[in-house]
Image (tube, rainbow, N blue to C red):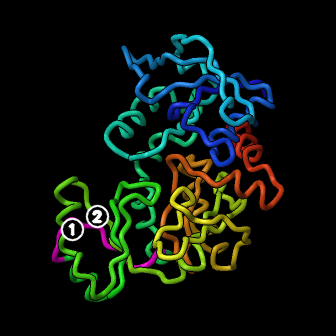
Amino acid sequence: MTLNVAVQMDPVDTINVDRDSTFALALEAQRRGYSLFHYLASDLALEDGVLTVWARPWTVQRIQADHSKLGEPMRLDLATMDVVLMRQDPPFDLAYITATHMLEHIHPKTLVVNNPAAVRNAPEKLLVTHFPHLAPPTLITRDRRQILDFRARHSDIIIKPLFGNGGAGVFHVGPEDENINSLIELFTEISRDPLIVQRYLPEVRQGDKRIVLIDGKPAGAVNRVPPQGEARSNLHVGGTARKTTLTRREQEICEAIGPTLRQQGLIFVGIDVIGDYLTEINVTSPTGIQEIDRFDDVCLEADIWNAVEKRL
């Protein structure tokens, strides 16, 4: 296929060419002869039911510090595109939610990946709550009494912002930690959002596994091992990527959630598994495909575009 693809993402100068999944997708699209256009979510404009952006033709190359070339800005009617990739990073705030509403005006005639309504209805940490048999004990609340009761019952816990990303604001709070009240106060003063509290999983020391699912099917995984003295395994905060394979339990998790993801039009999803537990389902801007490509000698970005073409 020859496709016109608009990519809604962050500024191109933020790209890490060795890690960025959007960059890998753009390279593969370009290799296939697709026409690429780049724009920011803030460029969206909806007037009389017509959704336009000021976009720029985009070419990419795997050269550090010279990875992107942008053409002259042009006003683009997104309904004339074949595909829109919604790949801007969280935070999942009202601006993000508004962008999903606006993109619904063109989807599915123009295929938006992932389905904007499903993205809006499936924030990473909330979608997991629909599969309680797969997740660790989890509490979502702003109420201090409920959080203290949860800690009393589970002793060792993790507290994090419900709509956070990239490991920001994640705290490991042990049974004797006296900072818990201060943490709750801090979180509730700076945001009206609830917190998510989970039982701490010591298996995280062996790694937090990122599994990529393409149209509901597991396509590969990478294990992210936290550095010494760190509760977070995210690669950009010092976690180490390691080659891995799926366990029987992880295959069961994928089989349990895959049909829901596929039905909702969530083509590219990254789930996080610690030990035997599903902790997050990432649908906004999942990452990990470059690391899996290198470890397993595969090309997940090609598999993703194959799935997109099949949807079209």
Q: Is residue 6 above or below residue 19?
A: above
Image spot of residue 9 (x, y percent): 52, 34
Is residue 188 rendered magenta in the image?
A: no
Q: Quadrant of the C terminus?
A: top right
Q: Are marks 1 and 2 in contact (CB under 8 Å)?
A: yes
Number of labelled discs?
2
Write down the region rendered in magenta. 135-145
Image spot of residue 303 (x, y percent): 75, 47
What SS does tag 1 mark?
helix
Residue at which label 2 appears: 195
Lower sequence index among marks 1 and 2: 1
Q: Is residue 220 above or below residue 252?
A: above
Residue at which label 1 appears: 184
Q: Is residue 90 above or below residue 138?
A: above
Of residue 233 and residue 275, the one placed in the foreground of this image is 233
- Looking at the image, is mark 1 or mark 2 nearer the viewer? 1
> Residue at the spot x=27%, y=88% of the render?
176
Of residue 262 and residue 58, the one placed in the foreground of this image is 58
What SS does tag 2 mark?
strand
> Residue at the spot x=53%, y=77% of the render?
204
Image spot of residue 208 (x, y percent): 57, 71
Q: Amino acid at mark 2?
A: Leu
Is residue 144 rendered magenta in the image?
A: yes
The disc at residue 267 is: none
Disc 1 crowd, CA 10 A, few/some/many (<14, 14-19, 20+): some
Disc 1 from disc 2: Cα separation? 9 Å
